[in-house]
Amino acid sequence: MSLLITGGTGYIGSHTVVELLKSAKDEEIVIVDNLTNSSTKVLERIEKITNKTVTFIKADICDTSALEKIFNQHKIEAVIHFAGLKAVGESNEIPLAYYQNNVSGTLTLLEVMARHQVKNLVFSSSATVYGNNISPLNETMATSATNPYGQTKLMVENILFDLAKSDEAWSIACLRYFNPIGAHQSGLIGENPNGIPNNLLPYVAQVAVGRLAQLQVFGDDYDTSDGTGVRDYIHVVDLAQGHVKALESLAHAKGTVKGCQAINLGTGNGTSVLEIVNTFKEISKQAIPFQVVPRRAGDLATVYADASLAKELLGWQAKLGLTAMIQDTWRWQSENPNGF
Ligand code: NAD
Ligand code: UD1
C-alpha cells in the first residue's frame, strides 16, 4: 500500500514525510510536487535522516493525466494534501493563480481520488479561516476569510464538508494549522522561503544570520502584554506528528474521524513578537536589530488555538516548547545560511 503526499518536498510536507517514515509500517511514500517552492535536494536529506527511500514524482496537482498515472501505478490508500500557494500578500496580487492552484488543483485531485475509490484525506487548512473571531479559537466557531489565500482554504474546506455529506465513504481531517516554526533537530531540513520572508520566524532567523539588516516589528500598540502581536507558534515536528495521528484516525484505520472534521493543530499558548526576538537573541547569541513600524494591514492582536479537540479525537498534543522551536530554527539557519 502507498500514501500519496502532495507538496511533500515543501516545509511542512518534508517534516511530515520524515515522521511518516519513522512511524512507518511498510507503506510506500509517494511524493508529488511541481517544485514551485521547493527543491529535490530535500529528498536526499529526508533519506539521510531516515535511512529510507521515497518515490518522487515531479507533477502538478492541476494535471489530471499525471495524477491518473500515479493512481494507476501505485496502490494509494490515503492522501495528505499539502500542495498549494501560501503567501497572503501575493494572493492579493495574483488571486487567479491562488484559486487555480489551491481550489481547482484540489478539485482535480479529489476527482481522481473518487474515481480510484481513495476516500481518506488529510488536508492542510489554516487558522486564517477563523477570520476575526476572538481567541482561543475552537472548531465550532463561524469561519470567514479576509484575503484570497484565506478564501481558497475556506472554499476547499466547504467543498470537503459537502463531499463528505454526499458520500459517507469519505473520511477527511481538515487540519487548521496555527503558526508552524522550527526545523528538524538534525539541522538537515527546515523552512526555505524564496525571496524576502513574509513570516516572522524566517525573517528573524535571516536577520540573526546576517542576510537581512533588521526586523520591522509591525506595531507595538496592540492590547497585549508588551503591545506586539501574539501568535500560537507550533514546532513543525509536532505538527508533522499531528498528521501521522490524523492519518491513523481516518476511517481506513482507527476511524475516530468520521465524515469531514476540522481540527486545530496548535499549542494553545500565545507568544508575542518581542518574546520571540528576545528568545532568539538569547539562543543564537546574535544581535537582532529591529525597528517598530505601523501595524500590518489585516493583522489581529492575539491568535491562539483551543487545542482540546485534537487531543480528544487524535490523541495528539504539542510537546515541544518555544526554546526547542527556536534552537532548531537557529541550527537549521546557521548550518544552511543560504537554504538548500
Ligand atoms: P511550502 O510552499 O513549503 O510547500 C508547499 C509545496 O507544494 C511546495 O513544495 C510547492 O512546490 C508545492 N506545490 C504548490 N503548488 C503545487 C501544485 N499545483 N502542484 C504540485 N505541487 C505544488 O508550504 P508549507 O509551509 O509546507 O505549507 C504546506 C501547506 O500548509 C499549504 O497548503 C499551506 O497553505 C498550508 N499552511 C501553511 C502554513 C504555514 O505557516 N507554513 C500555515 C497554515 C497552512
Ligand atoms: C500569517 C498569515 C496567515 C497564516 C499564518 C500562519 C498574513 C497576513 N497572515 O499570519 O494567513 O495563516 O501566517 O502561517 O501573512 N511580524 C512582524 N514583522 C515581520 C513579520 C511578522 O512584526 O516581519 C509580526 C506580525 O505582525 C504578527 C507576528 O509577527 O504579529 C506573526 O506574523 P506572521 O509570521 O506573518 O504570522 P501571522 O500574522 O499569524
Image: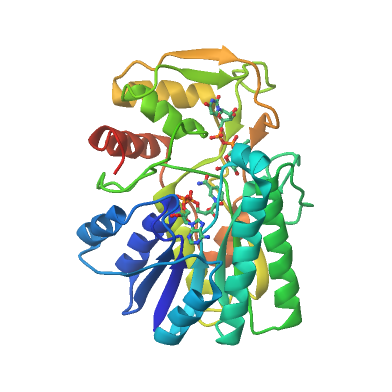
Q: Is residue 325 left or right of residue 128?
A: left
* Front-most of residues 191 and 195: 195
Q: Is residue 24 above or below residue 116?
A: above
| Residue 225: image location, x then y, percent | 61, 21
* Front-most of residues 234 and 334: 334
* Front-most of residues 7 and 24: 7
Count of picture labels = 0
Q: Is residue 217 visible?
A: yes
Write down the quadrant of residue 24 in the picture.
bottom left
Q: Is residue 1 above or below residue 335?
A: below
Q: Is residue 252 left or right of residue 142?
A: left
- The residue at the point 37 percent across, 63 percent down is 17
- The residue at the point 37 percent across, 28 percent down is 206
Q: Quadrant of the C terminus?
A: top left
Q: Is residue 263 visible?
A: no
- The residue at the point 30 percent across, 69 percent down is 54
